[in-house]
Structure formats: C-alpha cells, structure tokens
Image: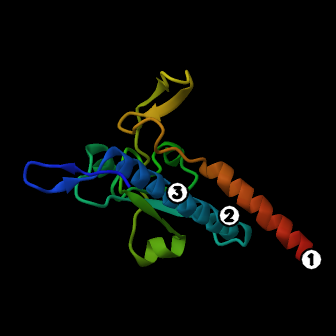
Amino acid sequence: MASRAKLANGRTTKTRADDDQLRKELSACALKRYEQIAEVAASRIAIGLGQTYLQFHTSGGHICDFCRQLDGMTLPIDSPIWRFCTPLCHDLCKCYFTSLTNRELKAYNVKVSEPRALQIHEYRDAQTGRIVQVVAGIQPGFGQWDWEGAIHRYLDAYLRKRKKRV
C-alpha cells in the first residue's frame, strides 16, 4: 500500500500512486459507460426509434472553466464535438453525460444546443513522437472517443444477430 503524505495540519493526502489508481478506475468506468451508450444508440437506430442525444454534465467540487462552458450542452451523438469532448476531459475530471431520446428531450423540455466552436490544435507526445489532435482546454490523452466507429460496430453486430434469427 502506498504511503500517505502528512500535511502540516496533521491530515493526510493521497500519494501519486493513489491518484494514478483512481484515474485508471475512473477511465475504465467511463469507457464501459460509453460502450453501453453506443450499443443502445445503435439499437435505437436499428429498430427505428431515432437519434440519440448526449448531454454534458459537470460534477464535483472543483470544475475547470472548460467543463463549466460545456455544462448542459446537448447535441446528437454523431456531432463532431463529442469526438473531442467526451468526459473525462482532464486529470481527475468528474464530468459525465447522459443519453437522451427525442421523447426524453420533449418530456424534460431540453433544447438541442448550438454546436460550439472548438480550437483544435496538434499535440506531439515528447516520449513517443505521436501527434494527435486535441481541443484547447482538454488535457492530451483525455476526452477522445470514436462514437461513430462504436455505433457502427454495434449496429453491424445487431443487424447480423437479427439476420440469424430470421
């Protein structure tokens, strides 16, 4: 077990090892949730229930300016912004989003947001030399998820399963 650092007031704080473990757990939970959302979105498309929307939410005590600007943003799941702004957006981010149907948008009186302009720039990893596109405000290595690819994978799997039944 990692040792804890002692503060002047006698309280203890988490060590870097504790932070790393928490980060891994949060990332794993978020990825599983995104897989579930993509699977449900694909099944909605396959059976004709229409578009799935994602709504960004902030959570926790300290909220960065970038996440605060996105709070409440509701856009279709295939909107390009979600490719870059999928929570977790930075180290120890506690933001999340929910998926909504057309019926839920009406029932909860949620308006679809105007797409936000993003400042996208290239980031080069000094260790690997790999270059990725990132949005200003999002820590490199965070915030990216291929929604379109995930939905297509699940939609193909769903349709193949339906063909086998027929």
Q: Which of marks 2 and 1 is nearer the N terminus?
A: 2
Tell me the tag on residue 166.
1
Q: Earlier in the sequence, mark 2 or mark 3?
A: 3
The secondary structure type at the circle numbered 1 is loop
Instruction: Decide if residue 48 is on the left or right side of residue 102.
Output: right
Q: How has the structure been colored for display?
A: rainbow
Residue 109 position by quadrant = bottom left
Instruction: Decide if residue 29 is on the left or right side of residue 11.
Output: right
Question: The disc labelled 1 sits on which kind of residue?
Answer: Val
Q: Position of residue 155 (x, y in %)?
A: 74, 61
The secondary structure type at the circle numbered 3 is helix
Residue 156 position by quadrant = bottom right
Instruction: Decide if residue 137 is on the left or right side of residue 5.
Output: right
Residue at the spot of label 2: 42
Q: Looking at the image, which residue is at 45% across and 74% down?
A: 106
Question: The disc labelled 2 sits on which kind of residue?
Answer: Ala
Residue at the spot of label 3: 28
* Front residue of 148 and 16: 16
Question: The disc labelled 3 sits on which kind of residue?
Answer: Ala
Q: Is residue 83 visible?
A: yes
Label 1 to label 3: alpha-carbon separation: 36 Å
* Front residue of 52 and 156: 156
Packing grade of label 1 (10 A; few <14, some 14-19, many >=20) is few
